[in-house]
Structure formats: structure tokens, C-alpha cells
Amino acid sequence: YNKQHQPGFRWLHDSFGTNWRMMEMQAVIGRIQLTRMAEWTKKRTENAEKILRAFEGSPFFSIHTPSVDYVHAYYKCYVQVNLEVLPDGWSRDRIMQEINSQ
């Protein structure tokens, strides 16, 4: 964006990502997806609640739950590893390896 442009036609784009306008097809797909948003959010919330319950009360993990007056979309559900209290031989990578092997 803030760079020295080559001489020639000023409005010729030589890189991607500078035009944020939505095409008609993208708009149609987006409108259809919006009708499913409540269903997706409900399912993500159910999944997040299972994850948070599984880690709740463990000294090895920290979970963050939103205030009761918020509605969280749970696009992502974070669980932090408390490295300083993990038993010897355990690390974030080993935890991920154990989870993925199940």
C-alpha cells in the first residue's frame, strides 16, 4: 500500500489483498451461512463446555470463561498449560501428543 509504484497505469494492481469488495457469489454464500449461525454457535458452545469441564479444577491448566452477561461464540476455546506445575517429563508438546494419540 505505502510503497513506490512502478510507472505506468496507476490503477493496475500487481499484488493481492488490496480490494476488499465482496463479489455477488460471496454475498449469497454469506447470507446462507448466516441462517446457520445460531445452530453453529449452539454446537460450538456445547463443545466448549465439554472442554472447559474437562479441564476445570486442574492445577495443570488454566481456563477462561466469559462473564455470565456475555454470549460467547466459542470460535476458539483456549486452555493454557501451567508449565511451572507440570510433573517431570511433561510439557505442552507431550500433552498435545497424548491428546492426539487418543
Image (cartoon, grey):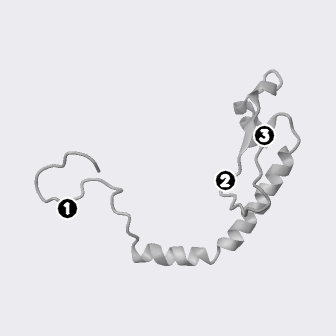
Quarter of the image with the C terminus is top right
Q: Quadrant of residue 80?
A: top right
Amino acid at the residue labelled 3: Ser
Residue 51 appears at what percent x and percent y? Answer: 80, 51
Q: CA distance from mark 3 to mark 2?
A: 15 Å
Camera-nearest label, 3 or 2: 3
| Residue 22 placement, left or right of 6 | right
First in sequence: mark 1 or mark 2? 1
Instruction: Check disc 3 and report its element: helix, strand or loop.
Output: strand
Query: Which label belongs to residue 78?
Result: none
Residue 98 appears at what percent x and percent y? Answer: 77, 37
Which residue in the rendered view is the most extreme toward the left? 8
| Residue 30 placement, left or right of 86 | left
Amino acid at the residue labelled 1: Trp
Q: Which residue is mark 1?
A: 11
Residue drawn at x 74%, y 65% is 43
Residue drawn at x 71%, y 72% is 39
Residue 61 appears at what percent x and percent y? Answer: 80, 37
First in sequence: mark 1 or mark 3? 1
Amino acid at the residue labelled 2: Lys
Rendered position, 69 above or below 35? above
Q: Label 3: few (<14), some or many (≥20) within 10 Å? A: some
Q: Label 1: few (<14), some or many (≥20) within 10 Å? A: few
Q: Quadrant of residue 31?
A: bottom right
Rendered position, 55 above or below 67? above
Circles 1 and 2: CB atoms closer than 8 Å: no
Q: Which residue is mark 3?
A: 62
Q: Which residue is mark 2?
A: 76
